[in-house]
Amino acid sequence: MTEQFAFPTRAIHAGQEFDPTTGAVVPPIYMTSTFVQDGIGGFRGGYEYNRGGNPTRDSLQELLASLEGGLKAFSFASGLAGEDTLLRSVLKPGDHIVMGNDVYGGTHRLVSRVFIPWGVSLSTVNMSDLDAVRAAIRPDSTKVLWIETPSNPLMKISDIAALVEIAKQTGILVVVDNTFASPYLQQPLSLGADVVVHSTTKYLGGHSDVLGGAVIVNSEELAEKVGFLQFGVGAVSGAMDAWLTVRGIKTLAVRVDRHSSNAQSIAERLVGHPKLDAVYYPGLPDHPGHDIAARQMKAFGGMISVAVKGGVGPAKRFAESMELFQLAESLGGVESLVCYPSDMTHASVRGTDLEVPENVVRLSVGIEDVGDLTADVLGALDRL
Ligand SMILES: *Cc1c(COP(=O)(O)O)cnc(C)c1O
């Protein structure tokens, strides 16, 4: 869709033309594994077999490319399936990858347990420290710089444009995991990154009802490589999953506005709370990444982490004792969730330098009434 329209308009219309045969406003879900040919090789609209292409998946991919300002998007069965396909497209044994020392635990597990045995090497660094990033780069072998900002769960902010400048000096591919911000708040390709990855399971889907991933690229060469492996490896999203994700994305702008204002309000209320040692939210003026976040993000998103006074016991009790914030992994849905990263999302990085402190609790602030949510959090803290 032409880029003349603003983000909220594109979120509803890009790749979503009405059905030409019936006029159905919402394009149909193409639940089919294969497509009839008009004579051998006579494909209708280029469609042959579902792993290679499906109109419902194509409509999601067109939408994602438009929202991230990318050349082409590829949709996958999960965020990790997309990451795996991307890394296989750009790495070979002997190559080196530099990633943040607080990336999503599953991303670290994918690289350390699947790619390292294959012959790739990994360095993890504090991505907010540009000198540390420069020092970790090996000019001969570093091929990928992997950035996640805001990071999970400590909400650290990395300066995408500054990291791009460092990486470009030696031709390193810059990948940004944009899951926490969503394309509504942050557009890494416009800051010079080469690739954006998403777990569409989170804000893009937005309703905690579908798993999915996406890889959005800005060059024909990369599109060719990722497109080949999407088909050749086959971790594609099914039609129903793609359709649910499209349905979620239509309201992304209004949802993320509300997620952000709710989280900002709750974070401000929690600052200085006697039961907390720290509040990690980039929208707070004393957050170390606040200025960079204010520059590269439209608002500060719906994720807050807190460090609970007294360590593991009170932290777990806090996580287990709220009513509206339900204890579950994942994030980015309309309903508020709470997670205890050390034992849940980040259990796989225990004992590595990505280990999450045992007093940290992560909140995915939903779009319920902010008064109800605030009362839920404060009540649970009072009972500690
Ligand atoms: C959830 C998540 C992933 C992995 O995505 P799945 O859809 O669960 O495979 C990757 N990165 C981040 C930041 C995530 O939150």
Image (spheres, rainbow, N blue to C red):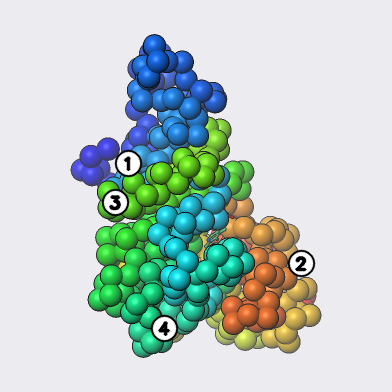
Q: Which residue is at the front of the view, 114 or 264?
A: 114
The mark lying in front, picked from 4 and 1, is: 4
Where 285 falls versus 168 (above or below)? below
Q: Is residue 103 left or right of residue 89?
A: right
The amino acid type found where label 1 is placed reads Thr
SS for dot 1? helix
Q: Distance between the residues labelled 4 and 1?
A: 41 Å
Q: Measured along the vertical axis of the image, is residue 261 above or below residue 236?
A: below
Q: Residues within 10 Å of mark 4 (few under 14, many from 20)?
A: some
Mark with earlier residue (4, 2): 4
In front here: 171 or 381?
Answer: 171
Quarter-of-image position of residue 356 = bottom right
Question: Label 1 near label 2: C-beta < 8 Å?
Answer: no
* Depicted 132 relative to depicted 15: above or below: below
Q: What residue type is labelled 3?
A: Glu
Residue 169 position in % (x across, y down): 25, 76
Callout 3 secondary element: helix
What residue does disc 4 label?
136
| Residue drawn at the location 59% of the way across and 78% of the way down | 354
Residue at horizontal 55%, vertical 65%? 118
Disc sitting over residue 221 in the figure: 3
Tell me which numbered mark, 4 or 1, is placed earlier along the sequence.
1
- Numbered marks: total: 4
Which mark sits nearer the N-terminus, 2 or 3?
3
Residue at the spot of label 1? 9
Q: Residue at x 77, y 67 (%)?
A: 321
The percent position of residue 181, horizontal first and vertical second, equals: 44, 61
Report whether residue 73 is seen: yes
Q: Which of the two discs, 2 and 3, sits closer to the camera?
A: 3
- Foreground of the two, 267 or 177: 177
Q: In which quarter of the image is the C terminus?
A: bottom right
SS for tag 2? helix
